[in-house]
Image (cartoon, rainbow, N blue to C red):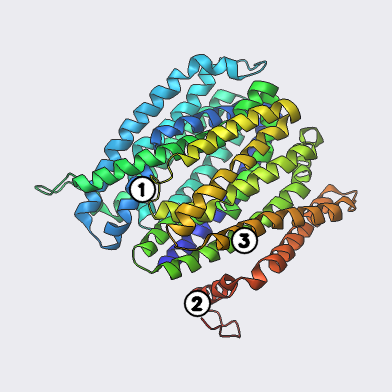
Amino acid sequence: MRTRNSLFNTFTNILFNLLTVFFGLLNRKMLISTLGVDYQGASGLFTNILSVLAIADAGMGSAIMFHLYQPIAENNTPLIRCLLKYYKNSYIKIGMLFLTGGILCIPFLPSLILNYTLPYPVWFIYLWFLFDAVCSYFFMYKRASLIAAQKNYIVMIYESLYLIATKSVQILMLFLFHNFIIYLLVMLLFRVIENILISHEAKKRKPEYFIEVYNEKSELSTDIKTDIHKKVKGALYGKISQAIFNGTDNILLSKYFGLSIVGIVSNFQMIITVLQGLCSSWSYSFIASIGNMLVSEDKDNSYLVFKEIHLVIVYFLVVGATGFTCVSNDIITLIFGEQYTLEYSIIYSMAASFYIYNLRAPYDIFKSAAGVVYEDRYVPLIEAFANLIISLILVKYIGIPGIFYGTAISSLVVLFYSYPIYVNKFIFNRKLNQYLRRILISFLLPVISIVIAKNICSIIAFSNPWSSFLVKGICSVIVGSIVVLLGYAVWAEETKALFKRLKKLLKIDLGEKYDS
């Protein structure tokens, strides 16, 4: 059941990302065609600024979620009610803190934009994005009950419906009115509707989680509160790190190069976001299942599951980084026009940032599921400030690529310090040499794959751009697959275990019975 829930979550996550790229690209195409690339740049900039403010969450959600796994597994409804009530009260306070912090940022917005030319005041456009981000905080606790119960696919279905409806109506409004404010109004209206529907679904499926029972204990024990506060303190540094990592790229681009560059780069960032969803974000749908597994099974089985997830993620990341390097300019040319392409020096830096940053996914999900957020609380902070400092230095010497190389280089802090200690040893009790061999091989694979695929693609010349895109894409998948197969999968014991798991899950006779 645990694996099947994870499969449903993974499937809907992948579907959500495919829908994201389709409707997102159509939406961007219409926005740029009707209003101009600066509007897309403003959208990317304000989204990044608000992702920095997301540190107001301070890890409260993941800390409470960790404590929901066991009572849900044991069907301890009174404790679940207490946790969700605490979750609700906490997120109302967090939402108000987020709103206050967002308003306080308004006076500083003009200094973050080089040569602002839009006809609307900066603060006016920004407030729409702020309200869109804030409204979800007041509904978050009901959404959490579905995620902790391994029903994240339900949330993803509603988010997919929100995406389709919002992007479709926005495209229609742009076509009819060419008005950015109507575009933003649609975004906010459908966000509120999405949150109401998810909350209704959670209450309908488990109404007993949300009812008030007379004389029932409604306060959490001191031990649970203490542990939540401890995890929140530890997660706060991680949230700061995440905010700087995900929230400063577009801010630096806007500050040094202007909104037009932000708009152009954000088109490539959308491709990366989709690749991230296909390559690694789906794995985060396993967190609830892994949390359940870690409290009920031995370390050896948990470590084997980790290696299976690591293998799958590395495969997708290698293929994704190779494909992005070889065909991203072709995709942008086909959709937006050749004037919106980027130099390959920038594309290489974005590919490096994408690969190294997302290589953390299998380690992060086990670390999060195990509740390890306090022990290495200072490491993400060091990583975040290293990212900012390196990016600021490199952007002055090598321009735009320096921003993305800063992210890639600073990611080495967690890959070579935090994860060896707090995942490899603390959770799995494994030797350091096993970890280092796995990481070093993971670093070599994309380099080999990109060099081979790029050289092959450089000799491919088709007059038809669609033919060029398809052939280069197929070449990237084939080269990436062969490199991972020969360089990793053929000698990894988790390959056999993964096929056994798929065979059992899908109930398909593969013609061979593997030994344990």
Q: Quick check: marks 1 and 2 in contact, CB under 8 Å?
A: no
Residue farthest toward the left in the current orientation of the protein: 215
Residue placed under numbered mark 2 in the picture: 504
Q: Which mark is residue 144?
A: 1
Quick check: 245 above or below 466? above
Task: Categorize mark 2 by other alpha carbons within 10 Å: few (<14), some (14-19), many (20+).
Answer: few
Q: Are marks 1 and 3 in contact (CB under 8 Å)?
A: no
Between 230 and 28, the one lying in front of the other is 230
Query: What is the secondary structure assignment of the residue under circle 2?
Result: helix
Q: How many marks?
A: 3
Q: Position of residue 512 (x, y in %)?
A: 59, 85
Q: Earlier in the sequence, mark 3 or mark 2?
A: 3
In terms of secondary structure, where does tag 3 sit?
Answer: helix
Q: CA distance from mark 3 to mark 2?
A: 30 Å
Graded by Cα atoms within 10 Å as few (under 14), some (14 to 19) or many (20 or more), the crowding at tag 1 reads many
Horizontally, residue 505 falls left or right of residue 143, namely right
| Rendered location of residue 180, percent (x, y) | 59, 25
Element at badge 1? helix
Image spot of residue 308 (x, y percent): 54, 66
Sequence-first disc among 1 and 3: 1
Residue type, mark 1 in image: Ala
Q: Nearer the viewer, mark 3 or mark 2?
A: 3
Residue 71 in view, yes or no: yes
Q: CA distance from mark 1 to mark 2?
A: 30 Å
Q: Which mark is residue 317?
A: none
According to the picture, the residue beneath numbered tag 3 turns out to be 437
For this rendering, which residue is in front, 446 or 254? 446
- Distance from Cα at disc 1 to Cα at disc 3: 37 Å
The residue depicted at 73 percent of the width and 52 percent of the height is: 323
| Identity, as a three-letter code, of the amino acid under mark 2 | Lys
At x 68%, y 53%, the residue is: 320
